[in-house]
Amino acid sequence: MDHQSLSIILRAAISPNPDERKAAEESLNQFQYTPQHLVRLLQIVVDGNCDMAVRQVASIYFKNFIMKNWSPHEPGKQSNVSQNDKDMARENILVFVAQVPPLLRVQLGECLKTIIHADYPEQWPGLLHWLKHSLQDQQIYGALFVLRILSRKYEFKSDDERTPVYLIVEETFPHLLDIFNKLVQIGSPPIDVAELIKLICKIFWSSIYLEIPKQLYDPNVFNAWMILFLNILERPVPLDGQPADPEQRKSWEWWKVKKWTVHILNRLYIRFGDVRLQNPENRAFAQMFQKNYAGKILECHLKLLNVIRVGSYLPDRVINLILQYICNSVSKASMYQLLQPNLGVLLFEIIFPLMCFNDNDQKLWDEDPHEYVRKGYDIIEDLYSPRTAAMDFITELVRKRGKENLQKLSQFIVEVFKRYDEAPLKHKPYRQKDGALLAIGALCDKLKQTAPYKSELELMLVQHVFPEFNSPVGHLRAKAAWVAGLYAHINFSDQNNFRKALHSVVAGLRDPELPVRVDSVVALRSFIEACKDLGEIRPILPQLLDEFFKLINEVENEDLVFTLEAVVDKFGEEMAPYALGLFQNLAGAFWKCMSTVEANEEGDDPGGPLAAVGYLRAIGTILESVSRLPHLFVHIEPILLPMVQRMLTTDGQEILEEVLEIVSYLTFFPPTISLEMWSLWPLIIEALADWAIDFFPNIRIPLHNFISRGTTHFLTCKDPDYQESLWIMISSVMANKNLPDGDIEPALKLIEVVFQNCKGQVDHWVEPYLKITVERLHRTQKQYLKCLLIQVIANALYYNPTLALSILHKLGVATDIFGLWFQMLQQVKKSGVRANFRRERDKKVCCLGLTSLLALPADQLPSEALGRVFRTTLELLIQYKDQVSEAAKDDESEDEDDNMDSFETDDEDDVGDGSNKEMGVDEDEADIIKLQKFSTQAKSFQPNEDEVEDDDDDDDDQSDDEELQSPIDDVDPFVFFVDTMKGLQASDPLRFQNLTLTLEFQYQALAGSVAEHAEQRRAEIKERNERLLPEDHIFRK
């Protein structure tokens, strides 16, 4: 297709006529893989004589094609782009990227990003040469634009993946430094200069983000860069051309240059300039940075912040970054010494005004209260907020330098309160009072720990916080609720004060101002958790829930859900009368939230997904709270099932963990699993096969419930065939050589579930499951997984020893399997601890499997094998008995350990302030000394190296198996062993006699001990069954 024809089709692609658009799209798809098509698209993009709308659609189509087709997404698949087209596209993009308008450059930049990530350095080695040449040949903007994309590829790379950065820096940084130096020297620089400097800053940032390139360790080279950055930092931003509108001003190129300069200096200081955080080889650099630059940067930052005092402009992000730098300086003795002369001005003339309610807050409160609430609870906003940085600073200041600063801050806050109280109503400094309350909230942890303040908190709340519940100013009512929530857990000497605050917060749920209602709901969580007399809340619970759901339907906010969870946790089964209403409201809020997320797919607001997760988690909390009321689940299920069905598709990828938790509850707590719930089985299996393999451990739990609690339906239903679909899934996972050992663990546990719950009813599945188990055992390296594979065999023997053993012989592996099994049972570490089958459940399963063999006749289990199995089982039973006994002792001593762990010392920081300062030690260094002492003490509780030398999977030993129901829970291995031996004695007395006569003395003693313990267990079980009524086990994920 020639240039003109392609232009006509592209114009038709943006036609208002849908038929024309559809025809154009079909033509583009038809010719997309023809030779030169990609190049012609690029020619239209860069053709200045072509209509801009056509150029723009060409650039978008060009970008989308490259992102989809440049590099195959599947291994081994051929690219749809010919090598010749690739070469021409790469060459021409580099030529034209700087020449096209910004609107098109953005699209070409995305193309370059895709190409560079796929091709550099292997398929595009000439790119670095082009960059170096262009930086010297005055093609500066294009070269910087491309170099920024290239450097960003390695921004988050570490170790070997980062190697190409060293050559990039070596080849380009000398030229960058030269260009940077010339740009800085330009008098009255135009805005184009700012854009070039900004690109250089971004390249530098990406190159040093995780690690400083070795070339910059040269003091002369690093100093040359630092001189330029400090020049930019100190230089006032030009006034000419600066936009008047604050929103446009913060995006102005010169302010962006200032922001990136501060960003870089912060990164160098916080990540690389801290001696304590560096390994020995980088410590010299950190010491050099502290000595030569850290103080100078602090001085520049303080001067820059000073413009706020006189009302001049400084972008929020720049303020935030500067305060982060100063905050990190508080703990360093030398830096704090530089900070001290300016601390009063900084605290009371810069920091405090930033904390006060301002004109922008009021404008947003009045014009868009929903956005005000969103920003107030958005963790992303906090990363950029000057107010949050100001709060972080005073928190760090009193934590590290509390003795000398907490009193100053407290006195200042008291003066603000005093001025407020004394001012007439029309002239009260409401905004300053708001800032003081915010400071009280920020200092909460320190004030609650420190004498004499902690004894005066109740009086402070009564005099200065609680009155603002009735303030005529909305933001003070909101702030009063927020502060009251933070202090709800203090010990009130007068419970009436707690009661009044609680009722004031509850009243705030009906406030006419949305932000007040939201802050009141969030504060209510703390009051509910701290409330000792639920009688205060119980009478108003229905109204409280009504107000809560009115609000949750109006605002998507995860913190609101936390309050609901607190209510449910506190009232437990008392929530039953409200349960259906709660589920209906939460499901409705969830659907609304998901609709918002879908409508905003291109947006980057995380609030919706976070709120959706919160709603699901609240549903799980309520399901657990009513778990002892199984009759409710018949009514709950129809409310939640449609939501779960939808979210088990790809729509629910981001929230699958929470959805599966709900499915686990719905398949465990009801009296039976309904046919409607069984409709989830195919969805779960399909998701696991297509995209949800990472969630296999979570998926295993509802599948376990389906099989164990719906065994009859699992076995009898043929449409769909659940047994077949389970086999297809498990065999696929087990045979997948690309899956690491750990990822197949849930498959093995599901095989166990089938054997244990379907005893005598799935004979035809024993051979296929044993076959894939043996095949995986042959290639498994992970020791813990070998144990699980052996346990599958043990379960098969317990299911049907005759069938299982015959299959192992048929597969020709019986001798090898038992040899490996016995060897693993005997393996110990140097300390004498058993290396394998370490959990109680592991030992029990092995005992049941081996004991089942003892009942086999001589033609299936020869006498020699019988003796070996008998002796091994005796040893294993004794180990199991000892382990159960030790666990019981540990449970008894657990309360004492908890009491010891709860020991705390008040005012620890204050003690440190005095002693460490006198010794000239930084506060963070003192913290490290403490940690080193704790580490030394902790070593006495750790095993020696030789004891854990071969233990590379300790973490895998932690499992939730013991919290899931199984038929073997009711089987006592000692009673089962003794009963099996009695059966052998009755059926074949001679075989039994021969076995006992050939036993060594030690095994005769073990047998007597096991028999005695079995009778003891039998009596205990009988007594327990007579004493206790059956109770439902509580399922915990």
Image (cartoon, rainbow, N blue to C red):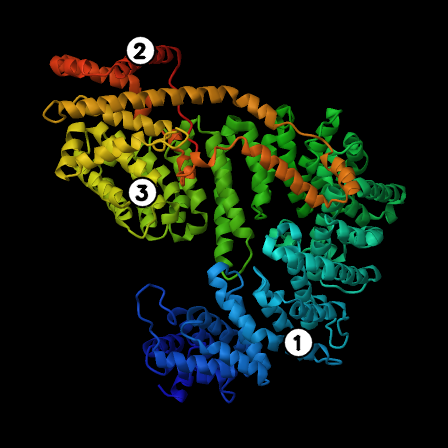
Classify 10 Å Cα crowding around label 2: few (below 14), some (14-19), many (20 and above).
some
* 660 to the left or right of 103: left
Tag of residue 212: none
Tag of residue 681: 3
**Near-viewer residue (41 or 306):** 306
* 420, above or below 705, in the image: below
Judging from the image, what secondary structure is the residue with disc 2 in?
helix
* 73, above or below 24, in the image: above
Classify 10 Å Cα crowding around label 1: few (below 14), some (14-19), many (20 and above).
some
Q: CA distance from mark 3 to mark 2?
A: 46 Å
* 533 to the left or right of 33: right
Q: CA distance from mark 3 to mark 1?
A: 63 Å
**Near-viewer residue (336 or 962):** 336
Judging from the image, what secondary structure is the residue with disc 1 in?
helix
Q: CA distance from mark 2 to mark 1?
A: 87 Å
From this viewpoint, is residue 24 visible?
A: yes
Q: Which residue is mark 2?
A: 1012
Q: Which residue is mark 1?
A: 180
From this viewpoint, is residue 712 visible?
A: no
